[in-house]
Image (cartoon, grey):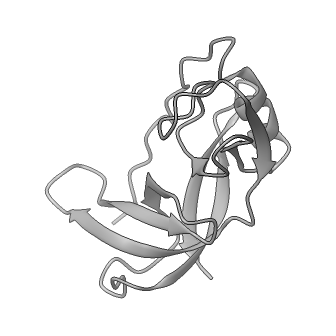
């Protein structure tokens, strides 16, 4: 049986997130760090959610993390896994796990970022087994 493919959705890009999406096209995962409270945060936004400072900067993540939790979707036309991954920098991001046997996924599993090209100038940061 052939595996069904689906079109990768293109994210809505705005002035605040443009730098993030440009970096994904180059295979880089950027996160924000607040220069005032030194906390990392994700999703990309100018204002720090911890101290409300606008003194934030882009930092390149190592792209390495662990599966915090996940859910496998088996009843959809294309089986897939959605997960929360905690990066080495300490932030947790919602993502998809790809190129992994869905029965082998475990909480605490080591993963690394893998970019999937949208075909429109940016890529989505998914994760695969490390």
Name which residue lies at 66% across and 18% down. 16
Report whether 61 appears left or right of 66. right
The spot of residue 62 in percent (x, y) is: 75, 66
The spot of residue 120 in percent (x, y) is: 70, 24
Q: Toward the viewer: 36 or 104?
A: 36
Q: Toward the viewer: 55 or 19?
A: 55
Q: Quadrant location of residue 20?
A: top right
Q: Quadrant location of residue 79?
A: bottom left
Question: In the rendered image, which quarter contains the C terminus?
Answer: bottom right
Q: Quadrant location of residue 111?
A: bottom right
Image vertical order of residue 80 relative to residue 57, above or below? below
Name which residue lies at 56% across and 71% down. 128
Report whether 80 appears left or right of 55. left
Name the outermost residue toward the right.
Answer: 26
Image vertical order of residue 103 relative to residue 18, above or below? below
The spot of residue 42 in percent (x, y) is: 54, 44
Question: In the rendered image, which quarter contains the N terminus?
Answer: bottom left
Name which residue lies at 80% across and 50% down. 27
Q: Toward the viewer: 63 or 125?
A: 63
């Amino acid at each position: 049986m052939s595996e069904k493919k689906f079109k990768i959705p293109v994210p809505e890009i705005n002035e605040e997130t443009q730098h993030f999406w440009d970096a994904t096209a180059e295979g880089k995962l950027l996160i924000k760090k607040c220069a005032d409270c030194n906390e990392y945060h994700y999703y990309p936004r100018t204002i720090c959610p911890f101290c409300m400072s606008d003194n934030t900067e882009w930092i390149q993540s190592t792209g390495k993390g662990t599966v915090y939790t996940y859910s496998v979707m088996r009843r959809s036309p294309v089986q897939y896994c959605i997960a929360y991954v905690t990066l080495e920098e300490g932030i947790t991001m919602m993502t998809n796990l790809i190129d992994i046997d869905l029965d082998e996924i475990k909480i605490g599993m080591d993963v690394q970022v893998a970019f999937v090209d949208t075909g429109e100038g940016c890529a989505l940061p998914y994760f695969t087994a490390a």
